[in-house]
Amino acid sequence: MRRLMMLLPLLAAAPAWAQGQDLDATIADALAHAPVLAEAQAGEAQAQARLDGAKAQGNPMLSVEGQIGAGRIDNGVFFGFTARNVTPLALRAGAEMPLYAGGRVAAAIDQARGGQAVAALALADARSRVMVGAVAAHAEVLAARRIEARYQQLASELAEVERQAKLRFQAGEIPASDLAAATARRAEGEAGLAAAQGRRITAEAQYSRMTGHEAGALAPLPALPVTPPTLDEALDGAQHSNPMLAQAEKGIDIARAGLRGAKAESLPTIGAFAEATRSRDQFFPDYRADAMAVGVRGRWTLFAGGRTAAKIHEADATLDASEARAREAREQIDAAVISAWTNLKTANLMVEASAARSAATAQALRSVQLEAKVGAKPTLAVLDAEREAAAADAAAIEAEGQRMVAAWQLNALAGQITP
């Protein structure tokens, strides 16, 4: 019967757990709400527009321009023309098709295509960061709530111990120092509870910021995601799939395209054109002139006063800088992966050690409580055991959340996170 009574609170809470939002739902809400993703998506749309614009440079261009007016001209009978009303008119329609641009158009397209790839990678990187942040927020809310509940229990127990200490002091069973110690421990427990409540409020606010809604009932953390089994595999995965590293390497391709474009400035451009014009003169009444021409037009700047050479030197320096950034990115990603791998292994050990510590302190607390009842242990020993058990429980709860976040962080660095 006693065991059944102990299970009743858990059975009553089971429906809330079943209805609580799970981690996948939290991640989905964060992805739908994150402003950083909206910004990255807008950047991707801008990059696509730039690519479309670069491709359009190789397409034919049609243009129409003209003007028409109304006036009166009086030549003083010069040339035999008397004063007349005139309607000057000038119309021009033209079409031009680039035939050869020295590689300018191809270089611009390659640069824009590289920019589009960088924007897509930036979106993927932002998405993975949002997902890891959502996992951290979910885990922190769960941990903060459980720690607050543990400290509420501790504060209640310490208040009861203080009450009993007062009774024993009044009965002359314990000295005033034991009563003072009980009062101090009760105050310490209340302070710990206040800190736990503040942490829970902060965690729920962070969750709300991440997902766009308040943190209601949350399901417990699921099993750990599959992570790279070895450090070498994690490093290899990061080198091939990490979005930040891929952005840095794509920057080299963009810089090379920019260098080709700068060198193309010294080459000629050739295009085919067709033009048709119609004009009515304002000085000679009834004058008409219609024309049409088809041909090839070219332009070649033979001397630019060093402008082209300066652009080439600038593009060379940009390429060198891009290669240096890529090397730095590879080193940073390797260091981050090693750190994340170590953090995950450490978190696994911390979970095991914290669980063992929590179980040991719980057993020690029970023993001290029994010994205190028969007078073998002072009240202070019970209070110390209560505090140690609460700290151990909090450490065990935190370790579980830290392990989950570490696993997701490692997968994010290794490029193994997908929505």
Image (cartoon, rainbow, N blue to C red):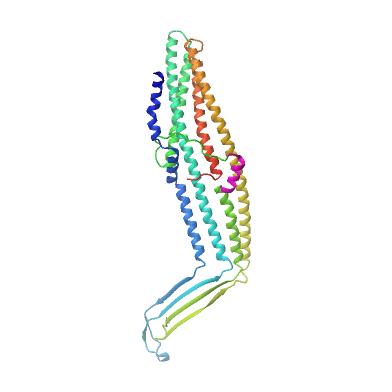
Where residue 200 appears, as percent x and y from the top left, is 44, 32
Rendered view: 402 above or below 300: above
| Horizontal side, residue 392 vs residue 263: left or right | left
Residue in the picture at 39% in, 25% down: 9
Rendered view: 322 above or below 381: below
The quarter of the image holding the N terminus is top left
Where residue 87 appears, as percent x and y from the top left, is 38, 81
Q: Write the start and end of the magenta stretch as one range.
A: 229-241
Where residue 346 appears, as percent x and y from the top left, is 58, 33
97 or 316, which lies in front?
97
Residue in the picture at 58% in, 34% down: 345
Rendered view: 229 above or below 370: below
What secondary structure do most residues of the magenta stretch adopt? helix
The answer to whether residue 209 shows anywhere in this view is no
Quarter of the view holding residue 156: top left
The answer to whether residue 93 shows anywhere in this view is yes
98 or 161, which lies in front?
98
124 or 265, which lies in front?
124
Residue 230 covered by magenta stretch: yes
Quarter of the view holding residue 90: bottom left
Q: Residue furthest bottom?
A: 80
Q: Residue furthest top?
A: 172
356 or 118, which lies in front?
356
Where residue 379 appears, as percent x and y from the top left, is 48, 14
Quarter of the view holding residue 86: bottom left
- Picture mark count: 0
